[in-house]
Structure formats: C-alpha cells, structure tokens
Amino acid sequence: MIQNTVINKIINKSYLHKKFYFTLKEIQLLNSNTCFILSISGGQDSLTLLKLIYDFADIYNWKILLVHFNHNIRCDSRQNANLIKRLANKFNLKYYLYNYDGIFTEEKARLWRYSNLINLAINKKCSYILTAHTLNDKIETLFLNLFRGSSLQGISTISSINYIKGIIKIIRPIINFTREDTYWFCRCFYLPIWLDLTNYKLDLKRNRIRNEILPYISYYFNPLIYYKLSDIIDIISKENEYLQWLMYSIYKKIYNFDNNGLNIDLFDKYHISIKRRIIQFLFKEQFDIYLNFEENSKILYYLNKRNYTDFRIQDKQIFLFFAYEWVFIRTGVYDTTKNIIDNLINEHHICIFINSYRSIISKKIIQIFDNLSVDYKIVNLFKNDILCEAIKIYSNSSIIPQIYVNGKFIGGYDIIFKLYSNGKLASILK
C-alpha cells in the first residue's frame, strides 16, 4: 500500500513519468533488484531516460550503471564526459567511460559502443541495457533503411526490445517519446543538456533527414508524420514476425540438419518471398553471411539452374552440389576442385560419386550399401562436367561410380561388388 502511494506520487510528477511507468509495466520491467546499464550521451533524450529511471530506482531497489562513450571527434568531448561524471556523482551512480581511438565512421562507432555495452553487461552480470532512442530516431532509421533499399525486416529493426546472446536485453523504454517530449522534460526538471554540434552537420545522412527532410514533410504534408509512420512500422514489424515464424517452420521441414542439405524440390514449391527468407536465414545461420538483395537473387538464380556451380559472395566462395532432390551448399576459400573433393570425402565416412541416379550401376551400388545398413554420402555428378573430370584426375581412375572410405579411394562398382560378394566389404567400411 505504501509502495503504491509512492509510485502514484512519482507518476504524477509529469505525463512522461506516467507514460514511462506504464511502458515498463507493459514490457514487464518493474522487477525488484534489477541491474540496468544506461548509455548516456548528455543530450536531452539520455538525460530524460536517466532522470526517469532514477526516480523509480529506490522503490524497486534497482542497480544503475552509467556508461558514456567519448568518440574524441569534438573539441569539447572531454568536457562532455566530465559533465556525465558529475551527473553520476550527483545521482550516486557507478560511472564507466570508454574512449574511442580508431578511425571514426558511424557504423564502426556503433559496433564499438554495442560491443563494450555487451561486454560490460556480461562482466557485471547485468541483463538489461537501456538506450535513449526516441520516436524520432525510429523514424530517421526508417528513412535511412528505405534509402538503402532495405527489406521489411530492415524497416522494422528498431523495436523496444532486442535480445543479445539469449540473456541480455537491449531496451529502448522511451522509443515512443518525441524529441519535443524530452526537450520539455529537461526544461521542466532543469536538466543540463549538452548540445552536440555534430548533430547539425548536414554531410551526415541522419542529420539531413532529421533537420531537413522530416521537418519539411511534417510542415507541408502531415504534422503527425512521426506517429503515422510509427504505426506503419509497428504493423510491418508484426507482419514480419509472422513471416519469419512461417519461414522457419518451413525451413525445418525442408532442411536436413544431419547432412546440411536443402530439399530443392520442396523449396521450389514455395512463394518467392518465403524462398528469399529461407536463403537469407540459411546463409546467416550456417555461414554468418548477411546477404543483400542482389546476392540473395544471385543464389536463387543458381539454385533454379540445378547445376553444380561456384561463385563468390562477399569474401567467400560458395559451392552448390546437387544430388537428386537435394542441394548441398558449402562455402570456403577453395582455389581448386581438388580442395572441393578433399572437403567432400573427408566430411563423410563413406562418399560415393555417381554419374546419375537413373544409372543401373549407380542403383546397384546404392543397393549394396543399403543392404549393409551403413550411412553414406551421395554426390551426383550428372551435368557436372567440371567435378566429374576432376574426380577422375583426383583418383587417377576414369571409372564412375567411385567410392571413398575414410578419405581413401576404394574403387568402382567391380571392386565393391567383389568385396561385397566375398563378405569383406563390411569389415572395410567399419
């Protein structure tokens, strides 16, 4: 009862206190004894977040760690950092300062900040990182992603919560506040805003969107543009979540996790939007490659041809091997077909190279290995003249099929049939 009275007293301090409280309640963040890392720049948005989280901290016994990143690109960077330190002392909070000494680009600086935040969270066993992104940031990012030619997934990237490594949550609790809200809040509570003059440099794309494009749209088209576009982003985000769920449910049905093969017959039955998402997901999960639209389209083109091929994506060589209804996607920095063959025969205890599933000899070979109840890998050389010639050179034998056990060439059909007939094949395959 006493706690409720104190809470009511705090949320009645301002309309933003109330909005902040119900936002935390909605995302289930009103837990006691929670540790929060706050990334603070000294601008109006981060000071608003600091004041709000601090006002509720005593009630819920929250531990707050204050972090400031000094990019060393402004002549007043040190004074800015000192202001944050004084604020940390005033609020009696632990303060961490990180100094950037690399060549500055927006993307490198962003990755540097998040890397340090995540490492600090892990070291301090803190599950929540709070950032002061606002509705304006959300809309600016929308425009940046649109201009880059982003997908639906890219358009809906800024959300109130992101999960990192399964245990750390990056929370944006004032994502539905506007900059007008935070400016009013700082003036109302006499918070010392540090003005960052680099926010007005129009050679930075985000600044031009912030200071020219969006004010123009707001004035001439719709003064509620931020709220309207935010609604659109939320709708797109929910639809994207559903499509990702649908994609993954299909992916689990058509991808063989034992041999890392994709059933190309089933894959071809789905809509192009699902196929693009499957390829995007597969390359991210299996090879840690983030495909752009052109790269995704290139892979789909080669999959549609259903012939062995190799090509470059970013800094990696991609190899597509087709075996009946399966396609096996491999990646690496292989320079010759010898490396491809080495990779295939060493990946599998038994590797069988055939010229076609329709070949009578191939069928007999497969029947022999099925009778022995052993696991094997089939590589179909049909329409793959390059690999077919390479395997003959590799083994110094012109026969096809070819059978390899533990990376060693055993022989073709005649030898396998002879070993099978006299009962010696089973022991060789062990």
Image: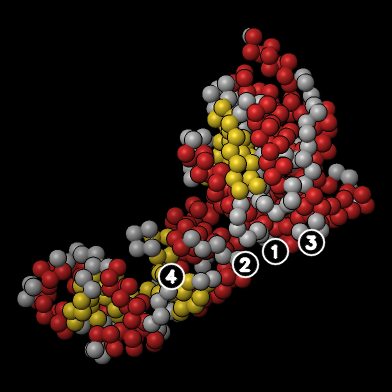
Q: In which quarter of the image is residue 224?
A: top right
Query: How many residues crowd around disc 1 within 10 Å: few (fewer than 14), some, or many (20 or more)?
Result: few
Quadrant of the frame with the C terminus: bottom left
Distance (Cα) linking label 3 and label 2: 27 Å
Q: Disc 3 and disc 4: Cα gap in Å? A: 39 Å
Of circles 4 and 2, the one toward us is 4
Circle 3 is placed at which residue position?
A: 203
Q: How far apart are marks 3 and 1 (CA)?
A: 20 Å
Q: In front here: 216 or 425?
A: 216
Residue situated in front as seen by the camera: 129 or 73: 73
Q: Are marks 2 and 1 in contact (CB under 8 Å)?
A: yes
Measure how far apart labels 1 and 4 are at the Cα level. 26 Å
Which residue lies at the image location 79% right of the left edge and 54% below the top edge?
Answer: 207
Residue 104 image offset from top left, x and y in percent: 65, 58
Q: In this view, does 163 lie to the left or right of 221?
A: left
Tag 3: amino acid = Asp
Colour mode?
A: secondary structure
Under circle 4, the secondary element is strand
Closer to the N terminus: mark 3 or mark 1? 1
| Residue at the (82%, 53%) spot, across then down | 200
Residue at which label 2 appears? 293
Residue 9, percent from left and from top: 73, 15
Instruction: Point out residue 401 in the picture as x, y percentages from the top left corner.
Output: 26, 82
Nearer-the-camera pick, 398 or 161: 161
Q: Residues within 10 Å of mark 3 (few under 14, many from 20)?
A: few
Mark 1 = which residue? 149
Q: Are marks 3 and 2 in contact (CB under 8 Å)?
A: no
Report the residue marked by disc 4. 331
**How far separated are the C-alphas under marks 4 and 2?**
19 Å
- Kindly state the secondary structure of the residue where label 2 is placed: helix
Tell me, yes or no, whether the two marked residues, 1 and 4, touch with CB atoms within 8 Å.
no
Which badge, 3 or 4, is on the more N-terminal residue?
3
